Image (cartoon, rainbow, N blue to C red):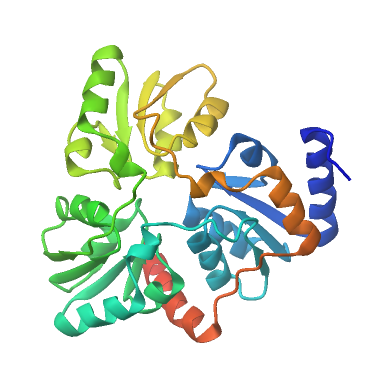
Amino acid sequence: MAIANNDELVDKILGLKREKKAVILAHNYQLGEVQDIADFTGDSLELSQIAAESKAEVIVFCGVRFMAETASILCPDKTVLLPEASAGCPMADMATAGKLREKKRELPQAAVVCYVNSTAEVKAESDICCTSANAVEVVRSLDNEQIIFVPDQFLGHYVSTKVKKQYFFWPGFCPTHVRISPEDILRLKKEYPEARVVVHPECRPEVINLADEALSTGGMCRYARRDDVKQMIVGTEVGIIYRLKKDNPQKLFIPASEQAICPDMKLITLEKVLRSLETMSPEVRVPEEIRLRAKAAVDRMLEVV
C-alpha cells in the first residue's frame, strides 16, 4: 500500500516502535525528518551509550555502519538495525585490521589510539578508543611516548598540537570535512564579522587554525546554547544545522561549506526506517570474539573520561 504522506509514515513507525519495544537513535548529520522521529539525537558514541542504558529490545540506529557496530559492541543482548545496509564511512574503510597489525609490528612500543569512527575489527586491534571530544584527554592519559593514531590523520594532528608525543598518523581522512577550505572560513568571517567560527577536529589544520573552537558535534550543540553566541559559522557536515536551528531558533547558523555533505548519512529515510522495523532488518551484529576485544578498547576509554 502506498504511503500518503509523512504523517502516515510517522504514525506507522511509532506504532511499530511500540510493538517491537524499539528505540530510534539518529546522528546529528541525519536528514531533518529522521531526526524528528528519533527518541534521541546526538553523536555516535553518545547514542551507543544511550542504547546500552535503554530498556529497549531493538535499537534502530539512523547513522552509518560503524555506529551500529559500536551499539552492537556495547549491547550484545539487543537487536541493532541499520535501516540502510550500504550506509558506510569512507574514513573508517581507510583502515583495515590487517594493515594495522603490520604497523603494530613495526612500532611495538606504540599505543594504538583508535577513533570511534572505525570498524569493529580495527577497534579490536587497538589499545584504546577515543572520540573527537575526548581524544586529547585519552592520549594524555597514556604512558606510551609513541602513538599510532588511526584512522583520521587530521584529528590525530589536532591532538598532537595539545599533547607532545611521537605520533604515527594513519593516512585516513573524512572526505566531507576536507571539503571545508580556509577560503570558505575567511570569506564567511568577512561576511559575518560577529559570528563565532566553530569547526570539527576532522577538518584540515589550516581550517582549525582559523576557528574560535574545534569541537565535536555534541560540543557544537552545547556551544551554540551559550548566551554570548548569537551567530555561528559551523564547520562540519551540514545536517547538524537542522538540529542547531531547532534547538536555538533565535540564532543564526551558517554552514562553512554547502559542499560539506556526507552522502552516506543521507541514505536513511522515513521509508527505510519503517521497512527496517517491519522486516527487523538489516541487522548489524559484531562476532563475539571481535566484540569482546573491541569492547575492551572502548571500556578503557570510558575509564579515562
Q: Is residue 80 left or right of residue 214?
A: right
Question: Can residue 135 be seen by looking at this rendering?
Answer: yes
Rendering coords of residue 148 (x, y %) = 21, 69
Rendering coords of residue 105 (x, y %) = 19, 85
Locate residue 116: give its quadrant.
bottom left
* Rendered position, 121 above or below 211: below
49 or 188, nearer to the observer: 188
293 or 283, nearer to the observer: 283
Locate residue 106: give its quadrant.
bottom left
Tell me the quadrant of the picture where the C terminus can be found.
Answer: bottom left
* Rendered position, 65 above or below 220: below
Q: Residue at x 34, y 48 (%)?
A: 175
Rendering coords of residue 127 (x, y %) = 31, 76
Q: Residue at x 22, y 43 (%)?
A: 204
Locate residue 20: give its quadrant.
bottom right
Q: Residue at x 21, y 31 (%)?
A: 182
Tell me the quadrant of the picture where the N terminus can be found.
Answer: top right
**Number of marks present in the image shown:** 0
Question: Can residue 115 be seen by looking at this rendering?
Answer: no
Rendering coords of residue 117 (x, y %) = 40, 59
Q: Is residue 198 left or right of residue 10?
A: left
* Rendered position, 22 above or below 180: below
